[in-house]
Image (cartoon, rainbow, N blue to C red):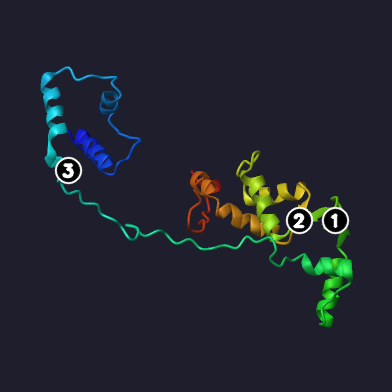
Amino acid sequence: MAEYEALLLGLQLALELKISAIQVYSDSQLVVNQINSICEVVDPVMADSLSKFASDSSLSSRSVFVEVLDEPSFTKPRVMEISTNPDTPSWTDSIVSFLRDGIVPEDRQEAMKLRKKASRYTLVNGVLYKRSFSLPLLRCLSPYEAEYALREVHEGVCGSHVGARTLAHKVLRQGYYWPNMYKDATHFVQKCPKCQFFAHLTHQPAEELTTLVAPWPFAQ
């Protein structure tokens, strides 16, 4: 009878507030069908009970306690904020500035290092590429673009969650380059949840192998 009590209390409150239109939602399909005249009460005992509930004035005098929480009932885990702003300084900025505008550091040693490093790069339509002996020009990626490339190759549409070395070689064959490709690929694979859950277990013993000398030539 709790469903009927809640419905009657809500309707009485709507009448007191002079509400002309109201939408009632209930988890009980029986109550909804009875209100919409789809189901009828056949049992006379149930009909008498409903009529008593409808005419009972004590329902409106009941007190309903509502608890209001001022703060969450559980503590949310804190997540470290990671900046993914593509406008952050990149390793390509100094090389692009030198190749495009001839800007070098004030330090003589740093300027010499930059000139030697920039000789292995070139600008094509404002985009930095790395020269290679056996490969075509490789497009240089910023840290933000490098992370996106690793994610797409590793777990994208055609991704197969390969290892770190294979992942770095796949990105390289696609025509991209940035320093520490293998190191970044290793860190990316180590942070992949699916690779951690479904990777092959290492059965190699934790201690060094002990060398055993077999006396087979003299064995009986």
Q: Position of residue 179 (x, y in %)?
A: 73, 61
Residue furthest out toward the bottom:
107
Q: Secondary structure at mark 3?
A: loop
Choose between 67 and 121: the one closer to the eye: 67
**Residues tagged 1 and 2 counted as in contact (Cβ below 8 A):** no
Secondary element under disc 2, as helix, strand or loop, is strand
Quarter occupied by residue 153? top right
The answer for how far apart the CA atoms under marks 2 and 3 are is 74 Å
* Closer mark to the observer between disc 1 and disc 2: 2
Three-letter amino acid code at the position of disc 1: Ser
**The disc label shown at residue 177, or none:** 2
* Residue lying at 71% horizontally and 67% vertically, measured from the top left: 89
Determine whether label 2 and label 3 are within 8 Å by CB. no
Would residue 165 be seen by someone viewing this image from the given angle?
no
In this rendering, the label closer to the viewer, 2 or 3: 3
Name the residue tied to disc 3: 60
Give the amino acid at mark 2: Tyr
Marks 1 and 2, the one that precedes in the sequence: 1
Q: Is residue 37 left or right of residue 148?
A: left
- Residue 38 position in % (x across, y down): 29, 19
x then y, percent, for residue 204: 51, 51
Mark number displayed over residue 132: 1
Q: Earlier in the sequence, mark 2 or mark 3?
A: 3
Neighbor class of circle 1 (other Cα within 10 Å; few <14, some 14-19, many 20+) is few
Direction top: furthest residue? 42
Q: Give the CA separation, mark 3 to mark 1.
A: 85 Å
Q: Residues within 10 Å of mark 3 (few under 14, many from 20)?
A: few
Q: Residue at x 30, y 33 (%)?
A: 27
- 220 to 145, vertically: above or below: above
